[in-house]
Amino acid sequence: MSNWFMYFLFYSFAGYLLEKLFAWAVRSDRQVRKCFLLLPLCPVYGLAMTALLALTPAGGFWRLSLIGGLVCTLAEYFVHLFYDKAFNVRFWDYTQMPGHLQGRVCPLFTLIWGVLSALTARWIQPGVEILAERTPPEVLFVLWLVLAADCVLSGTLLLRYHDIELLAAGAALAQSRAASQSSTS
């Protein structure tokens, strides 16, 4: 169980880095976080990769690509649906992409997720397994606590303000300060 938690954290962090790299590569003027947490984690990536690894521990590249594309797209769709229904926010929007489904998923990214997940399962996962096995239980416990606290704080911010921009740590602190100053005035 602890290995799966480490897989989730690792791939959530890798997803965060991938989002930042993508925003930089396309020279996005809007560097909005594509994730639920204040921490530099994109849980949809962690969920998708751990689901893929649980469902398909081995296989050829094309089999992994096909299953990876489907698993990642399903994870992306349902995580987006959850964010939309639970918090009334949208972290990504594919409505400008051809073949999109409610702006939550699109065929182009299904292909991209398929190839990336197959490459990851084949080349990166063996190293992640070693890292997970070597992580001391005390570190895992602290990571669980930090993640749980972040989920509560992030969820509270989103439920109250429905604004994903607040998940940038500086914006969240500024909002908190502004709220406390206005209540003391």
Image: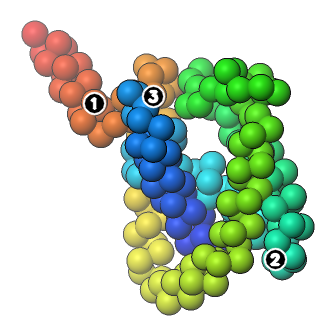
What residue do we see at 26% from left, 24% from top? 175
Between label 2 and label 3, give the one nearer the viewer: 2
Left or right, 184 with respect to 1, comes to left
- The colour style of the image is rainbow
* Residue under numbered circle 3: 164
Question: Residue type at mark 1?
Answer: Ala
What residue do we see at 30% from left, 32% from top? 172
> Which residue reaches farthest top?
185
**Residue 160 visible to an observer of this rendering:** no
Percent across and percent down for residue 55 are 85, 67
Query: 178 or 79, which is in the foreground?
Result: 79
Left or right, 53 with respect to 38, comes to right
Mark identifier at residue 4: none
Percent across and percent down for residue 20 are 43, 47
Tag 1 secondary structure: helix
Tag 3 secondary structure: helix
Percent across and percent down for residue 38 are 39, 44
* Residue under numbered circle 1: 171
For marks 2 and 3, give the CA distance: 35 Å
Question: Residue type at mark 2?
Answer: Pro
Q: Earlier in the sequence, mark 2 or mark 3?
A: 2
